[in-house]
Image: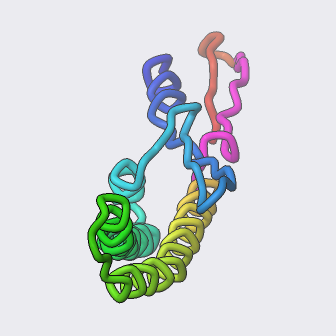
Amino acid sequence: MVFAFAAMTFCNAQKIEMTKIFGGYKFTQDGTPLNRRDLVKTMQPNQEAFDLIKKSQSNNTLASIFSFVGGGLIGWPIGTAIGGGEPNWTLAGVGAGLIVISIPISSNAGKKAKQAVELYNSSLSQTSYNENKPKLKLVANGHGIGISMNF
């Protein structure tokens, strides 16, 4: 019985906490920072939250690619200008456009991650140890004295 109580205490899933930061959210679980890969692993048992976090991860990857390429296209003409060459400012314009495109994609990724975490946390509260704490009672009857655990 002590083993069952200890297993319930330590096997309980923890809520994921979100903190709004510049450009998105920071996620932690029990004080440990979580990246998007960690979120995917954590949410795997909850299919609906898992699907949302996978979409968030895909959107985040796409936004990162657009931002990286856009930054390179902006940096190339700037580097050329600094080096004394003739810069192609059209490239910088295309790069700026890619960065602008990446902003709503990144924002959407953050929103999907937030929705996934909220969904995951709400599913925990339905089955959480904290919500359904076992109640221990001292029982005495004609057969002796014992402890009863009710859920």
Q: Nearer the viewer, residue 80 or 53?
A: 80
Magenta span has 39?
A: no
Q: How many marks?
A: 0
Q: Nearer the viewer, residue 100 or 2?
A: 100
Q: Is residue 121 above or below residue 31?
A: below
The residue shown at (31%, 82%) is 88
The residue shown at (70%, 20%) is 139
Percent position (x, y) of residue 147?
63, 18
Q: Is residue 145 above or below residue 47?
A: above
Q: Which of the 4 quarters of the picture holds residue 81?
A: bottom left
Res. 107 visible in picture: yes
Image side of residue 26 versus residue 79, left or right:
right
Q: Nearer the viewer, residue 55 or 62?
A: 62
The residue shown at (57%, 67%) is 119
Percent position (x, y) of residue 52?
44, 74
Q: Is residue 49 above or below residue 30?
A: below
Res. 47 visible in picture: no
Q: Residue furthest front?
A: 84
Image side of residue 123 versus residue 75, left or right:
right
Percent position (x, y) of residue 135?
70, 32
In which quadrant is the C terminus drawn?
A: top right
Image side of residue 44 versus residue 5, left or right:
left
Colouring scheme applied when the structure was drawn: rainbow
Percent position (x, y) of residue 125?
64, 55
The residue shown at (50%, 82%) is 100
Image side of residue 78 versus residue 108, left or right:
left
Highlighted magenta segment, given as a residue range? 127-140
